[in-house]
Amino acid sequence: MQGAGNDYIYVNTLRHPIADPVRTSIKWSSCHTGIGSDGLVLIGKSTKADFSMRIFNADGSEAMMCGNASRCIGKYVYDNKLTQKEVITLETLSGIKILKLHTENGLVEEVTVDMDLPLLTNSRQINTPDGKMLAKTITVDGKEYKGTFVCMGNPHLVIFIDDIKNVNLPAIGPKLENHPLFPERTNVEFVEVLPDGSLRMRVWERGSGITMACGTGACATAVAAYLNHKAGRKSRVRMDGGDLQVHWNETDGHVYMTGPAVKVFDGEIEI
Ligand SMILES: N[C@@H](CCC[C@H](N)C(=O)O)C(=O)O
């Protein structure tokens, strides 16, 4: 399945348990020797919510949260009749998220995810030496990058720039991901504010590299844009694979992300 082009292999572990998800994600994500994906997502049962999600990056590392995968799970469980609910709770390593399904002709087209509160101070995931987050200047290869840190269950470094075409993402992405400031590594977003006010973002994902979109990254981008006076509470985040709508609600402080969820194909693989 894919959400704005961020593609994962989804396994319904209620029927097909995966004994070694780390090894499986590395093997299956490989474009030339596996299936090819940004990682592996396990849909499971939960004692606290309707379903659970575990997300593994292409390098086998497990993440706490995935925005695009949450939407795709909403589509998977509804379209495959694992539930008839149109509001679903999903247990993740970063808490329970609420998915609101938008259906057309009995199938899910879009999903709004309550992504909970953004974390703007230090978190377990991002241990900066001084314990202070928000704006920070990071020097890499003699060049300074001013980043805003936002944790959406997982860590994001959002960098605003004037012209996104000037970013050499394959070169700078891994250097920022593995910068000593982030002992647990980080996702990295470069963002240009377009004349219509939308946010053009490209992402280097921790553990997967360049992806066509990142849901938590889009939310982090919208929050950082508001904090840096570059956008209002509602933003359209435009990524290589499509757009997401993000609303940082001032009443409850939660971030709401809305976007598509698409099935690419069903398949069987021997393990
Ligand atoms: N693509 C995802 C985020 C996946 C996890 C991330 N690479 C991490 O390690 O934190 C999304 O849509 O949010």
Image (spheres, rainbow, N blue to C red):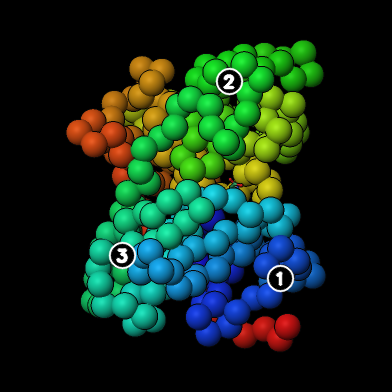
Q: Is residue 55 visible?
A: yes
Label 3 – label 1 distance at C-alpha:
27 Å
Q: Are marks 3 and 2 in contact (CB under 8 Å)?
A: no
Label 3 – label 2 distance at C-alpha:
35 Å
* Residue sitting at x 73%, y 55%: 59
Which x, y percent locates residue 153? Answer: 49, 43
Amino acid type at image mark 3: Ile
Amino acid type at image mark 2: Gly
Label 1 – label 2 distance at C-alpha:
35 Å
Which x, y percent locates residue 137? Answer: 62, 14
Judge left or right: residue 152 versus residue 25. Answer: left
* Disc 1: which residue: 20
Which x, y percent locates residue 157? Answer: 57, 30
* Residue sitting at x 54%, y 50%: 64
Secondary structure, mark 3, is strand
Judge left or right: residue 176 versus residue 256. Answer: right
Amino acid type at image mark 1: Asp
227 over 246 or under it: above or below: above
Quadrant for residue 190, please give it: top right
Residue 180, disc: none
In the rendered structure, which disc, 3 or 1, sits on the residue that comes first in sequence?
1
Taking depth in this image into account, of 132 and 178 the one nearest to the observer is: 132
Judge left or right: residue 249 versus residue 61. Answer: left
Q: Are marks 3 and 1 in contact (CB under 8 Å)?
A: no
* Disc 2: which residue: 131
* Disc 3: which residue: 88
Q: What is the tally of numbered marks visible in this picture?
A: 3
Which x, y percent locates residue 266? Answer: 53, 81
Label 1 neighbour load within 10 Å: few <14, some 14-19, many 20+: few
